[in-house]
Every structure is written in C-alpha cells, then in structure tokens.
Image (cartoon, helix red, strand yellow):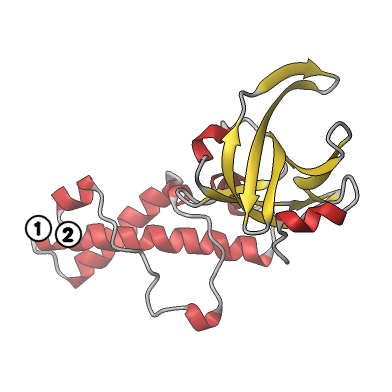
Amino acid sequence: MKVAKISDIENLADGSVIGEMSFQVTKAYPPKTGEGKFGPWRVQNCVIKDSTGECKASFWLPDDMAQFIGQTITVKSQGGAKGLQGVSVSFNKHGGVNEIKVTDKAALLDSATGAFRQAETANKVNAALASGQGGGTVADAKRLIFQRAQLYVECVKAASWIAKTVEAGDMDFQAIVSTLFISSDKANLWNVFPATAAKPAAEVADEIPMGDDVDEFSKEAGW
C-alpha cells in the first residue's frame, strides 16, 4: 500500500479514501463536541506537515491530538463491510482546498507508543479467535500466536529465576514453565503484548526478539 503524501491530496476528489499517511502534527486546536443524528461527536482540527507540504486535518477521535504535537504519526484506513474507511480527503469550501479527515475507523500509530488504536482492534479479533468465534485472517492468527509466544518467553524467564532460587531440576523447571504459562494465559496476560503481525521469513530469528528493556520488577527479581 502506497503511503500518501500531503502533495498527493491536492488533485484528489472530495471523499477519496487514503490508504495510509505519515505526517507530523504541528498544531492542535481545542476540540469541538456536540450531539447529532447519530449521537455525540467530537472533532479536533489540526495542522499537519510532511516533506511535501502542509495542510489542515480534522480528527474525529476521542484522543487529544495535542499530545502528538512535534511527533510523526501514521494513520491507516481499515477494511470493513464498506471497504476501506478511516482516512479520506475532505474539500474545504471556504478555503477552496483539500484537507484530511480522520475518523475512528482509522488505525492511529504514533512514534512513541506504537499502534494503540490498531492494538485495540487486534485485541478484539484475538478475543474472537481465542473463543472460537473465528472471523479473523491468517495475519490475525499469526498475531495471536506471536503474542502468546512473547508471554511464553516471559514465563520461561520467570521459571529460570524460580528454578535457580529453589535449585529445581529439569523436570521441575518444565512444570514451572507450564504452570506459569497456563495460569497467565487464562488470565489473558498475552493481551498486554504488542499485537504485531509476524515478520517476513528473512527477518525471523531463532528466538523471538524481546528487546533489552527491563522493568523495575524484573530488576528486583533478577530476570
């Protein structure tokens, strides 16, 4: 999917759906709210820019866009019953120029925390897959497996610490891992891990990359 630039929207028709865009938020105005035919609404107008130019954008989202000022974010249209929705061109009759409209149908990713809105959607799909309801894709299944794989790795780390502390044998170690994983899985702790799709085969390592981040609890526990 091509990543659109601000310069690309100049010649697009009003209502044209945009698959994906990345830009920097330079200004965010106070949000406006109200009650309409389909219930309450909230919109926040912003100024965005990329390497090709600058334009206005309206975000029909519950998120305060002011928190993203100075950051580069990516918005992606998501597939649904009516096709791709979420990011589109909106013609401003007063200014006579095209602007960007982003609704809650879009996935919003920011450079600091990643795809928090996309993760919400992925978690709903994961829950449906886990309960046997189906409705997901192969990519959704891979994401669900990847999340549980990350949980399993953390259980192995915790079990290693326990085994070292109590001098457990190999059989005990496997039992500890299984106990931790089963209980954690039942508690849906896999849901807190990044809902990222499987990487291309060329990038797959022997072990799932977990990064070097160590939280305070892990430091104290020695994992």
Q: CA distance from mark 2 to mark 1?
A: 6 Å
Residue 151 appears in which quarter of the rendering? bottom left
Asked if disc 2 and disc 1 are in contact, CB closer than 8 Å, the reply is: yes
Give the residue type at disc 2. Answer: Trp
Q: Position of residue 90 (x, y in %)?
A: 83, 41
- Given residues 207 and 128, the one toward you in this image is 207
Residue 200 appears in which quarter of the rendering? bottom right
Mark 1 neighbour class, 10 Å CA radius: few under 14, some 14 to 19, many 20 or more? few
Identify the secondary structure beneath mark 2: helix
Give the residue type at disc 1. Answer: Thr
Identity of the residue drawn at 61% across and 23% down:
30
| Side of 89 relative to 54 (left or right) | right
Q: Position of residue 127 (x, y in %)?
A: 59, 47
Identity of the residue drawn at 67% across and 58% down:
52
Tell me if I can see residue 218 in this picture.
Answer: yes
Q: Is residue 197 above or below residue 200?
A: above
Q: Which residue is mark 1?
A: 165
Q: Which residue is mark 2?
A: 161
- Given residues 201 and 44, the one toward you in this image is 44
Identity of the residue drawn at 54% across and 45% down:
116
Residue 60 appears in which quarter of the rendering? top right
On residue 4, which mark appears? none
